[in-house]
Image (cartoon, rainbow, N blue to C red):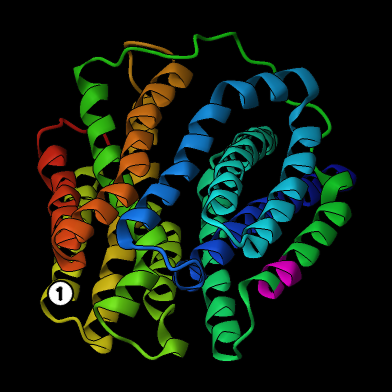
């Protein structure tokens, strides 16, 4: 009995470490986007186009990743994908031309989604060992890694360390972690029924999908443009350019660990309504009062706003009676991912035509759709 308990805890720790690895890798890239933009002399529109390659790579990898995990198992794919993910991070820092950066960002998105599918498959297996929901804790670990990545990014920027050497150090750490924890991950995956790759959502799922869409537009924008906003609009000192991103990731992580308690007290609808309000207030504060103090406060609010939306939407989708939980979550996540896909390039194109502050205003309005749509749904808490 004790052996099983220790083994179960080891499995959980190893999978949590995988979430941390993927989160730290992504956050390291996001924290240095402004420096890479300057290095290659990119316009806002050009950066928007390059950022578009990341979700395109993720989209391309969807059917491939599922097939690979089914054929070879999530342990092997998670190990290989996480290692390759770290290596591509190095190549991003090494890129000296727009085409090189474009290709690297594409593969970064492809491998990132491959990591996402394989480690979430591992998480489902560990969750079955516990017999209760622990998925939120894994995603909270990803957010904590994002906060750590932002903090490290702030430090290396202040020390004038180039993105290449920054990414090289991070990759070495992450690959070492993969080697150490691999034997503690689950060797075999749970067996599930075959389900279609795409599912047509009903009206309820469509609304849930649109809530996810509204939130992920904001998430994608904050991941890719928070540093640029602090650099160009806030005009923060070089060493504080990543402050907004760190603030966002910090409250996003905190909100994920607190979300379940809030839902228990006030219900899903009120939490989602408050989420949309926090997003629009936070972004408008940053737009109207673009100083370091107020922009940071605004980004803190946005982090709280987006933190619980996707987990709650996936939870609600999984309880639908019109189709299986797996198909429902796939349908909702597909709609949501479109928001993540179009958000960052939309910001870039609008910023090029008007200004970055106008871009963030539009994103604020989309974020508020979370509140509006949550009001239109009859929730079962």
Q: Quadrant of residue 177?
A: bottom right
Q: Which residue is mark 1?
A: 285
Q: In the rendered structure, which segment of residues is drawn in magenta?
A: 165-170
Residue at screen point 51% across, 57% down: 140
Residue at screen point 35% across, 68% down: 226
Mark 1 falls on what kind of element? helix
Q: Is residue 249 above or below residue 339?
A: below
Residue at screen point 63% across, 15% down: 192
Please indicate whether residue 336 sits to the left or right of residue 346 in the image.
right
Image quarter where the N terminus lies is top right
Expressed as whole percent of the image width and height from the top left, the position of residue 333 reads 39, 31
Please indicate whether residue 287 sits to the left or right of residue 251 in the image.
left
Please indicate whether residue 202 sits to the left or right of residue 10 in the image.
left
Q: Nearer the viewer, residue 144 or 223?
A: 223
Expressed as whole percent of the image width and height from the top left, the position of residue 120 reads 61, 37
Residue 102 visible in the displayed image? yes
- Give the main secondary structure of the magenta stretch: helix
Expressed as whole percent of the image width and height from the top left, the position of residue 354 reads 13, 61
């Amino acid at each position: 009995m004790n052996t099983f308990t220790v083994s179960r805890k080891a499995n959980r720790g190893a999978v949590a470490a995988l979430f941390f690895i993927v989160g730290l890798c992504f956050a390291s890239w996001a924290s240095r986007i402004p420096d890479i933009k300057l290095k290659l002399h990119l316009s806002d529109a050009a950066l928007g186009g390059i950022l578009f390659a990341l979700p395109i790579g993720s989209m391309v990898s969807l059917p491939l990743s599922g097939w690979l995990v089914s054929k070879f198992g999530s342990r092997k794919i998670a190990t290989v994908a996480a290692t390759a993910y770290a290596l591509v991070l190095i190549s991003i820092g090494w890129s000296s031309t727009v085409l090189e950066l474009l290709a690297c960002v594409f593969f970064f998105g492809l491998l990132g989604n491959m990591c996402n599918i394989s480690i979430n498959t591992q998480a489902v297996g560990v969750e079955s060992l516990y017999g209760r929901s622990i998925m939120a804790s894994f995603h909270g670990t990803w957010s904590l890694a994002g906060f750590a990545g932002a903090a490290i990014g702030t430090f290396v920027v202040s020390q004038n360390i180039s993105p290449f050497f920054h990414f090289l150090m991070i990759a070495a750490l992450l690959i070492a972690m993969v080697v150490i924890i691999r034997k503690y991950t689950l060797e075999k995956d749970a067996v599930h029924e075959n389900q279609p790759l795409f599912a047509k959502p009903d009206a309820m799922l469509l609304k849930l999908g649109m809530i996810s869409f509204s939130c992920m537009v904001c998430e994608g924008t904050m991941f890719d443009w928070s540093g640029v906003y602090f650099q160009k609009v806030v005009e923060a000192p070089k060493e504080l350019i990543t402050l907004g991103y760190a603030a966002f990731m910090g409250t996003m992580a905190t909100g994920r660990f607190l979300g379940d308690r809030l839902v228990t007290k006030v219900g899903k609808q009120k939490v989602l309504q408050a989420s949309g309000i926090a997003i629009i207030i936070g972004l408008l504060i940053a737009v109207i009062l673009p100083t370091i103090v107020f922009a940071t406060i605004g980004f803190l609010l946005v982090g709280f706003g987006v933190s619980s939306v996707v987990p709650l939407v996936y939870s609600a989708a999984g309880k639908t009676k019109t189709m299986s939980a797996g198909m429902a979550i796939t349908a909702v996540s597909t709609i949501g991912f479109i928001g993540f896909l179009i958000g960052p390039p939309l910001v870039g194109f609008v910023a090029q035509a008007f200004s970055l502050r106008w871009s963030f205003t539009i994103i604020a309005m989309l974020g508020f759709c979370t509140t509006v749509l949550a009001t239109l749904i009859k929730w079962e808490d």
